[in-house]
Image (cartoon, rainbow, N blue to C red):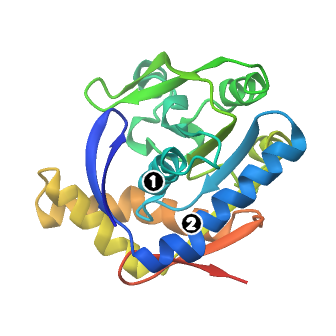
Amino acid sequence: MNVTLKINGLETQARFNDQEVETLHKPLLKQLAEKQRQLQRRLVVFLAAPPGTGKSTLAAFWEYLSTQDTELPVIQALPMDGFHHYNDYLLANNLKQHKGAPQTFNVAKLTDALRALHQPESEWPQYDRNLHDPVENAITVKAPIVVVEGNWLLLNQPEWQSLRALCDYSVFISAQPERLSERLIGRKMRGGLTRQQAVDFFQMTDGLNVLRVLENSQPANMQLCMDEQGGYHQIL
C-alpha cells in the first residue's frame, strides 16, 4: 500500500506491506476502537520507539487507516516534539548540543497536556522544522483516539515514569541498533550533511539516544519489532 501522509505539516510518501496492514495494523486499530468504546472517553495511546524506527510515519498511517474504515473511530497522531524546551532555554542551560535527549524536553508541560486530553477538546503544540522551535496550540485535539508518539514516553526515569498513569495503552518498537544507524546517517545525508558529518552526529547524539531508548524503556502493552525492510511484526 502506497500512501501520502502529512507529518509535521509536510507531505511524505510511505509504503506499507499489504499483508502487514491486514494482519497487524487493522486488527490493532480495531482493538483500540473496542477499548475506547469500553472506556466511553478519549483513549490515549503511547507509541514509543528509538529514533529511526518510523514511529511518526506509523502514527500518521494509523490516522490515515482510521479514515478509510467506517467502523473505526477517528484516530489523531500527536507528536511529542512540540514539548522540546525552546532554543533560548537550551542555550541558557548549555543543552543545545543535546537537543532530542530527555533533558531537553519540558516534561511538566507534557504532563499537563496529557491530562488535558481528557477534556472534549484541547490544544497540542507542534515542532516547527523551519523555526526549530515549538509552536503552541498548533493542533486542536478532537479525535476519540489519540496516538502520542515519541522516543521517551516509556523512559524508565522518575519524572517520565509518571506519564504512564496518563496512558491507556502503549506500543513499543524495537530494532537492531546497527540497522537504525544506517537509517539515521542516511537521513542526515539527505538533509545536506556529508557522510562524515552524519556519522559524527550519529555518534554524538542519535546513537546515544537509540541505545538509551532500547535499554531503558518500560515494558509496553504491545511490542513491535522493525525488520530489515522497515516493516513491523509483533513480538509475542
Is 132 left, or right, of 174 in this rendering? left
The reply to whether the C-beta atoms of the residues labelled 1 and 2 are less than 8 Å apart is: yes
Residue corresponding to mark 2: 25
Cα–Cα span, label 1 and label 2? 9 Å
Q: Indicate the quadrant containing the N terminus: top left, top right, bottom left or bottom right.
A: bottom left
Residue at far front of view: 70
Q: Residues within 10 Å of mark 1 (few under 14, many from 20)?
A: many
Residue 12 at x, y = what percent?
Answer: 27, 49
Residue 80 at x, y = what percent?
Answer: 55, 38
| Relative vertical location of residue 21 with respect to residue 80 in this rendering, above or below | below
Is 149 left, or right, of 231 in this rendering? right
Residue at position x 56%, y 53% in the image: 151
Q: Nearer the viewer, residue 96 or 163?
A: 163
Q: Indicate the quadrant containing the C terminus: top left, top right, bottom left or bottom right.
A: bottom right
Asked which secondary structure carries label 2, the reply is helix
Residue 102 at x, y = what percent?
Answer: 59, 45
Residue at position x 16%, y 59% in the image: 189
Residue corresponding to mark 1: 61
Asked which secondary structure carries label 1, the reply is helix
Is 57 left, or right, of 141 in this rendering? left
Q: How many marks?
A: 2
Residue at position x 79%, y 26% in the image: 118
- Kindly identify which numbered label has been placed on residue 142: none
Q: Nearer the viewer, residue 44 or 107?
A: 44
Kind of residue at disc 2? His
Is 177 left, or right, of 155 in this rendering? left
Kind of residue at disc 1? Phe
